[in-house]
Amino acid sequence: MALSKPSINLLIVFLFTLFLLSFSSLSSAHPELKTKKQYKPRKNLVLYFHDIIYNGQNKHNATSAIVAAPEGANLTILAGEFHFGNIAVFDDPITLDNNLHSKPVGRAQGFYIYDTKNTYTAWLGFTFVLNSTDHQGTINFIGADPLMQKTRDISVVGGTGDFFMHRGVATIMTDAFEGEVYFRLRVDIKFYECW
Amino acid sequence: MALSKPSINLLIVFLFTLFLLSFSSLSSAHPELKTKKQYKPRKNLVLYFHDIIYNGQNKHNATSAIVAAPEGANLTILAGEFHFGNIAVFDDPITLDNNLHSKPVGRAQGFYIYDTKNTYTAWLGFTFVLNSTDHQGTINFIGADPLMQKTRDISVVGGTGDFFMHRGVATIMTDAFEGEVYFRLRVDIKFYECW
Amino acid sequence: MALSKPSINLLIVFLFTLFLLSFSSLSSAHPELKTKKQYKPRKNLVLYFHDIIYNGQNKHNATSAIVAAPEGANLTILAGEFHFGNIAVFDDPITLDNNLHSKPVGRAQGFYIYDTKNTYTAWLGFTFVLNSTDHQGTINFIGADPLMQKTRDISVVGGTGDFFMHRGVATIMTDAFEGEVYFRLRVDIKFYECW
């Protein structure tokens, strides 16, 4: 049976509709079909935080303290074996640039655990509590921090306020350090899921 | 060339289809185009949990204990300087109302770290393990808890069972406290991403 | 008024399009309308990790150590009351099979906290740092681990590298244990959100 011209037109509309539907479906429901290179952060934020660990002599400056240590170690000297087993609690100032004395835009609060015996690696759980004219809200992070690598990626697992429900990846760099007392981290926060 | 009536009809169907597609695409694939005010939780749950911290004399009642402290502090008295450096581990009953003696619907399990020297702030990592006729599953939380503020927002970063893959924000209020031994938290859990 | 045949055809195309649209909408934009059973992981990974806890006599083998304990307990013997209040830090090898001596494909790094007084329950925060020909990247986990249950579900809250922005659920099983020194966990990681 030969199709009439209107029927052919109908068929074209129908097929084109199907084509559009599959395209829509691809772009919204199956992000994993894209290659990674296509993702661009929807928001980007570069911040610094400054950690001054208590060593028994810097009570007034210190922004962090060792609170747990393995057997045989104490709470004023980081443990041997690459500090394996030390837990430090911190409340560090966050600045927009790499100057410890710049006006803070918030506080980095949480803990790190040195968790490796044969190199410097920490496990991080912390929150950026931002309170400035530009940003009000919190950003929550967890992840592994292999300190000897130039850049390390951790997860942004949630946020509140201006960062409501955000997710992403944060790239950490050790921007500077002085002995085992001061270190400054540069955090490049890339939000890929924003609400 | 003038269009025949069937062709015009086809055009209408096609354009209407396109219109529906763009609407569908907007609502599903680009949540960031909405303003924050438009978000309503898909599920809401208000629960209470009750923390009784071990102080050396309440072994039988206590639901939490100090397990780490900064140099010079001990494990039965919360440390000076706003408890900075204390880690407490807890397994607290969860109730539907604000009565400690109501039948528990689950347990709040995890830890808090006092992480600030000049005010009361804690960092929380914990799980609600719910086991009742209404809810079976777990909800995982992390975030900063500035205790002196009336309400504090933390992140719901995942869930299992009835809360499979859920994400959201939980608003915490200190509902009551007695000295430094008992406190009761009201948690208003708002799930924005449900599966 | 009777409809002409082309008009009826148009109507059929239109209704079928609507039908497809609602289907597409259901599958992509409103996952909560599905029942839980319909979800299949987009990726699945089964891995093992091996924890050897330091007991004062196994310094060279040990991959984890007690670093915090409640009042009255020490750092070489797990505390009484179901180890309530112990925090252990670990850096455990990950293998593809259940053999401790297989070539590791990465390290499981983080901590567990025994948080219950009347049964064995731990709270976990850790990262799989994978570094093999098959997988490069990190997977971040948190959740409650009621050890006496055959299987326990925790949350995969984020990832980096090959696991960029992934979320999911991991089912943990105690695959073997020897006294209180060695235990092996089987982790069945199901990624439901991939990018």
Image (spheres, coloured by chain):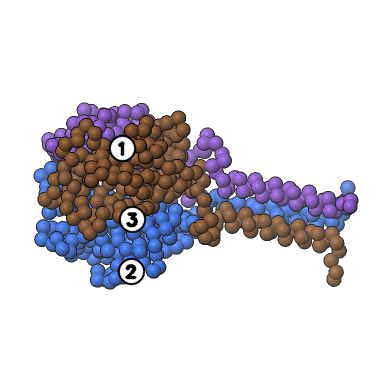
Chain colours: A purple, B blue, C brown
Residue under numbered circle 3 = C149
User: Mark 3 to mark 1: distance in Å?
Assistant: 22 Å
Residues at badges 3 and 1 in contact (C-beta under 8 Å)? no
* A39 relative to A157 in the view: left or right: right
Q: Identify which residue is drawn at 46% across, 39% down.
A: C164
Q: Nearer the viewer, mark 2 or mark 3?
A: 3
Q: Residues within 10 Å of mark 1 (few under 14, many from 20)?
A: many
Q: Identify which residue is drawn at 84% across, 56% down.
A: B6
Q: Chain of mark 3?
A: C
Residue under numbered circle 1 = C92
The kind of residue tagged 2 is Leu
Q: Identify which residue is drawn at 25% across, 44% down.
A: C178
Residue B9 occupies quadrant:
bottom right
Residue C105 rendering spot, x and y as whole percentages: 39, 33
* B21 relative to C6 in the view: left or right: left
Q: Chain of mark 2?
A: B
